[in-house]
């Protein structure tokens, strides 16, 4: 039997969620004590309990101490799931994405495809959003050989929750591939998603998105500088193009954004000397 200390390190619910999931994969019994001992409300909260019960149901396992507030939990796993459709509702604004993270490893090694509809909170502090799950985590997992998709069905916020996501997982074929992330990617793309709740008439999401567009802050086409460019040349470039800042770009990678004030502070001589070509030349990067 595995005996992790639920109060170790940060003492968070992650020890419970992943402890149960990994025990299910290993086929080993698990006993966790001191669950969330360092938290203001120690013991299992609804979101942790839902995750534990979800994994137990997937593998036909049994639980002892499966109640809100419990500081001790015993889990005995059964066989890995055959696949199928499941639905769990946390009943609070607890994180549905953290629930998804608990069941994802088990579903990855099921005998057949799994579909999960998960209800609760989607956007809260200290938990990854559904958008992070979709656009940051899952693309990396696909490179490992795990095929999974997540759809946001309905947003849900603190304090009531009420959100819903759909997670679809295909079982892994063969072994997972190693993931090596040694060098930064060559493609640079900056984008985001603006989301607001019940504020459509006031166009809050639209106004937030519009205020973040690069066109509000930079000229078109974008004026760029190269690493190693003389800082006096950069100052003249900004003056000639009537821009207040230039991005320093190497290939498709943004190195740094240099403003007119950055140039002024970098020069030991007054700013007007800069504009007539006086002062010491320095390098941007």
Image (cartoon, rainbow, N blue to C red):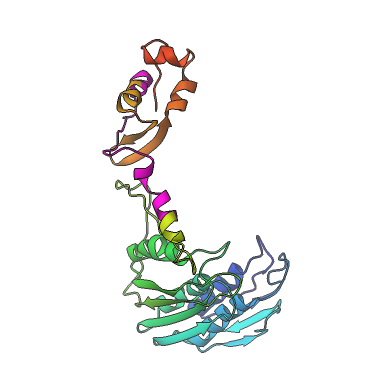
Magenta residue span: 208-235
Q: Position of residue 22 (x, y in %)?
A: 52, 74
| Above or below 252: residue 48 | below
| Above or below 193: residue 217 | above
Q: At x 48% / y 74%, what residue is drawn?
A: 100
Of 29 and 214, which appears nearest the observer? 214
- Magenta run includes residue 218: yes
How many numbered badges does the structure rendering display?
0
Of 131 and 70, which appears nearest the observer? 131
Of 216 and 98, which appears nearest the observer? 216
Lateral position of residue 200 relative to residue 159, left or right: left
Point out the residue furthest to the front here.
201
Lateral position of residue 205 relative to residue 157, left or right: left
Q: Position of residue 57 (x, y in %)?
A: 51, 87
Residue 273, visible in the rendered structure: yes
Residue 183, visible in the rendered structure: no
Point out the residue furthest to the left here.
221
The quarter of the picture where residue 255 lies is top left
Q: At x 30% / y 46%, what residue is drawn?
A: 186
Q: Quadrant of the C terminus?
A: top left
Lateral position of residue 64 relative to residue 245, left or right: right
């Amino acid at each position: 039997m595995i005996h992790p200390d639920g109060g170790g390190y940060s003492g968070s619910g992650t020890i419970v969620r992943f402890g149960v999931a990994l025990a299910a994969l290993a086929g080993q019994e698990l006993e966790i004590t001191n669950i969330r001992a360092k938290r203001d409300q120690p013991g299992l909260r609804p979101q942790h309990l839902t995750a534990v019960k979800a994994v137990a149901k997937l593998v036909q396992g049994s639980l002892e101490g499966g109640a809100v507030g419990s500081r001790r939990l015993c889990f005995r796993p059964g066989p890995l799931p055959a696949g199928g459709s499941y639905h769990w509702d946390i009943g609070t604004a607890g994180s549905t994405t953290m629930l998804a993270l608990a069941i994802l490893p088990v579903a990855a090694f099921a005998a057949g495809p799994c579909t999960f509809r998960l209800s609760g909170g989607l956007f809260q502090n200290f938990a990854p959003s559904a958008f992070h799950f979709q656009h940051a985590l899952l693309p990396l997992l696909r490179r490992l050989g795990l095929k999974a998709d997540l759809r946001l069905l309905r947003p849900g916020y603190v304090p009531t929750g009420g959100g819903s996501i759909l997670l679809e997982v295909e079982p892994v074929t063969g072994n997972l591939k190693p993931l090596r992330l040694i060098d930064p990617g060559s493609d640079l793309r900056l984008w985001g998603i603006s989301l607001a709740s019940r504020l459509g008439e006031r166009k809050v999401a639209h106004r937030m998105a519009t205020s973040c567009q690069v066109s509000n802050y930079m000229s078109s086409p974008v004026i760029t500088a190269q690493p190693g460019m003389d800082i006096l040349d950069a100052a003249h470039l900004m003056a000639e193009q009537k821009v207040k800042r230039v991005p320093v770009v190497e290939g498709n990678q943004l190195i740094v954004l240099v403003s007119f004030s950055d140039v002024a502070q970098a020069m030991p001589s007054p700013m007007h000397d800069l504009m007539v070509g006086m002062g010491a030349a320095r390098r941007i990067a």
